[in-house]
Amino acid sequence: MRLRWTGLRRTQAPANVVAALEGDRALDWALDTRTGEAVVAGVERLHVVSAAGVRRSMPWHLVDSGRWDRDTSALVVTFVDRSPTETWTFDLDSEFPISFRARVQASVVLVEVVDLGTKGSARVVVRKDLATQRLLTQAVLGKGVRSTDPGVREALDEALANVKEQVGLD
């Protein structure tokens, strides 16, 4: 498939936003139309920059997922550490959700869904720290699942051992 060049170029992030990234290179950015904050997809991290400076800077391997709502032009983002979700609203022509997805996917090496029966499910994930290229594992519990529920810890330990073996982690 051959892509057609349209001649359109993304605008560069403002100088104050780039300066706030502390060395991370901005691949894409968009303005949250609700707050006026700049949301930046860096090579290594996701950044949210307000007029006062960086409000949030999170390595990509700690970003769990994003859900784009086309009707409201909102990107709802969840994090592995279960910190509060973020919701950003962009102009309809923004390509930021595409860049966001690409960076999250760049950090994912392997995913295995763990069926926990009536308790629900979880995911074990091998992710790459895009700053250091180091591989690490994560267990992400599904809605309503607790690590203290009977059998959950054992199932997660088994699944984590399996994905570690698949990618050669000790």
Image (cartoon, helix red, strand yellow):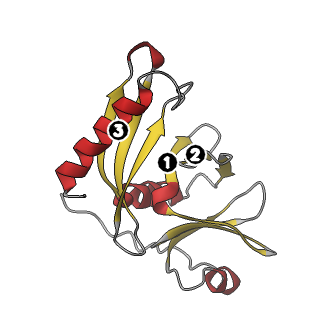
Picture coordinates of residue 162 (x, y %)? 23, 42
**Mark 3 Cα-neighbour bin, 10 Å: few <14, some 14–19, many ≥20:** few
Query: Where 62 falls versus 7 (above or below)?
Result: above
Which residue is tagged 1?
64
Q: Residue at x 20, y 55 (%)?
A: 167
Question: Is 28 left, or right, of 163 in this rendering?
Answer: right
Contact between labelled residues 3 and 1, with CB atoms less than 8 Å apart: no
SS label for mark 1:
strand
* Left or right side of 150 for 161: left
Vertical order, 118 against 156 (above or below): above
Residue annotated with mark 3: 157
Residue 78: numbered disc:
2
In primary-sequence order, the first of circles 1 and 3 is 1
Task: Look at the image and tell me whether residue 112 can be seen.
Answer: no
Q: CA distance from mark 1 to mark 3?
A: 20 Å
Q: Mark 2 or mark 3, which is nearer to you?
A: 3
Q: Residue pushed farthest right?
A: 52
Does 117 sit left or right of 38 as displayed? left
**In 3D space, how far apart are the residues under numbered discs 2 and 3 (Cα atoms)?**
23 Å
Helix, strand or loop at disc 3? helix
- Point out which mark residue 6 bears: none
Q: Residue at x 73, y 57 (%)?
A: 33
Numbered marks: total: 3
Residue lying at 37% horizontally and 55% vertically, measured from the top left: 105
Q: Residues within 10 Å of mark 2 (few under 14, many from 20)?
A: some
Q: Splitting the image into 4 quarters, where does residue 37 fall?
A: bottom right
Residue nearest the observer in this picture, 117 or 99: 117
Quarter of the picture holding the N terminus: bottom left
Percent x, y for residue 121? 42, 26
- Vertical placement of residue 14 versus 6, above or below: below
Foreground residue among 65 and 158? 158
Sequence-wise first label, 2 or 3: 2
